[in-house]
Image: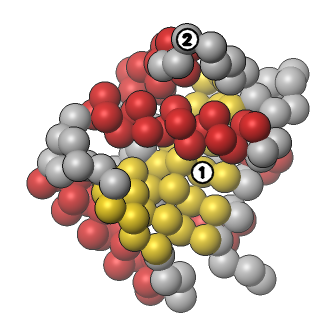
Amino acid sequence: MQLPKVNFYVLSSQSEQGRQAFACKLAEKAFRLGLKTYILTNSLHQAQQMDKLLWTFRPNSFIPHAIFQDSLPDTANTVIIGTQQPPAPWQHTLINLSTDCPVQVEQLKQIFELLDNDETQKQAGRLRYRHYQTLGITPNTHKM
């Protein structure tokens, strides 16, 4: 069994909007590479914010996306956003905007953890970092 690659991105901003904008850039890159991508959020409200932002974050960009609520999208390369474990076909790339660790990480290929300078975010991030280490994963950290 191959464990996923985990990358922590520590943003210099201290805002949810900054993390969400960075998530959009990662989702766009993954979409262009043809990777099935899931954005994990804490709440339906946060998922709806991401849904809106993916339409507007860059004027000339189009990323097919949908909020996941039990049925899979018709288009194979759609980025899906949700609060639960990604469905089996979408377990390649996970962008984590949630404060929790994704469940069943061994089923994923890569995980992007997004943190900002907010102390609560950093604390939750440290817990997730340690959790990955206990699974035998050595996360990479990138200061942005």
Q: Left or right of 69: which side holds 75?
A: right
Quadrant assignment for the C terminus: bottom left
* Residue 94 on image: x %, y %: 60, 51
Residue 107 vs residue 92, the one in the foreground: 92
Q: Earlier in the sequence, mark 1 or mark 2?
A: 2
| Left or right position of 101 against 15 | right
Residue at screen point 53% across, 88% down: 136
Residue 71 showing in the rendered view:
no
* Residue at 68% over, 18% down: 62
Q: CA distance from mark 1 to mark 2?
A: 24 Å
Vertical position of residue 110 compared to residue 46: above or below: below
Q: Is residue 77 left or right of residue 112?
A: right
Local secondary structure at mark 1: strand
Q: Quadrant of the N terminus?
A: bottom right
User: Tag 1: residue type?
Assistant: Leu
Residue assigned mark 2: 59
The disc labelled 2 sits on which kind of residue? Answer: Pro
From the image, tell me which residue sits under label 1. 94
Q: Nearer the viewer, mark 1 or mark 2?
A: 2
Specify few, some or many for label 2: CA neighbours under 10 Å numbering under 14, 14-19, or 20 or more.
Answer: few
Q: Looking at this view, name the residue that lies furthest to the left.
A: 119
Task: Give how far across and how far down residue 6 sits, in percent.
Answer: 53, 68
Say which of 105 and 95 sits in front: 95
Task: Residue 23 in the image: state x and y as whole percent.
Answer: 48, 39
**Observer able to see residue 57:** yes
Image coords of residue 125 (percent x, y): 30, 62
| Element marked by disc 2 | loop
Residue at the front extreme? 60
Task: State the residue in front, 99 or 15.
Answer: 15
Q: Residue at x 35, y 78 (%)?
A: 130
